[in-house]
Amino acid sequence: MPTRLEMERAVLKRDRSRDGLFYVGVKTTGIFCRPVCPARKPLRRNMEFFPGPREALFAGFRPCR
């Protein structure tokens, strides 16, 4: 997985080159998404990163629509 700073930047920029490398969970909503998700971007302090959807599910997050 990339560094936390790289992942935060990828999410905020919707960087397509990082799609599939990691997933981001949003602590305030309990949802996880791909870095290119068109939803409103979370604050950095509310982001949690996972190598795949399985890890995000086990951490208690649910998938984005």
Image (tube, grey):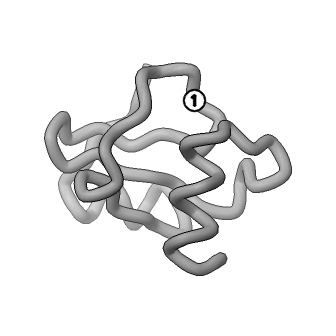
| Residue 38 spot, x, y in % from top left | 57, 21
- In the rendered image, which quarter contains the C terminus? top left
**Neighbourhood count class around disc 1 (C-alpha, 10 Å): few under 14, some 14–19, many 20 upward:** some
Q: Residue furthest left?
A: 28
- Specify the farthest residue to the right: 17
Q: Residue at x 44, y 52 (%)?
A: 24
Picture residue at 74% right of the left edge, 44% below the top:
15
Q: Is residue 62 left or right of residue 38?
A: left
Say which element carries label 1.
loop
What is the number of callouts on the image? Answer: 1
**Taking 6 as reference, is 38 above or below it?**
above
- Comparing 64 with 37, the one in front is 37
Residue 60 location (% of width, % of height): 19, 54
Quadrant of the image for the N terminus?
bottom right
Whether residue 19 sits left or right of residue 23 in the image: it is right
User: Taking 17 as reference, is 28 left or right?
Assistant: left
Which amino acid type corresponds to the residue marked 1 in the rendered image? Cys
Give the residue at mark 1. 37
**Horizontal and vertical percent position of residue 2:** 65, 77
The residue depicted at 60 percent of the width and 55 percent of the height is: 9
Q: Is residue 13 left or right of residue 56?
A: right
Give residue 32's quadrant in the image. top left
- At x 57%, y 29%, the residue is 37
Picture layout, residue 57 above or below residue 62? below
30 or 13: nearer the eye? 13
Q: Image quadrant of residue 50?
A: bottom left
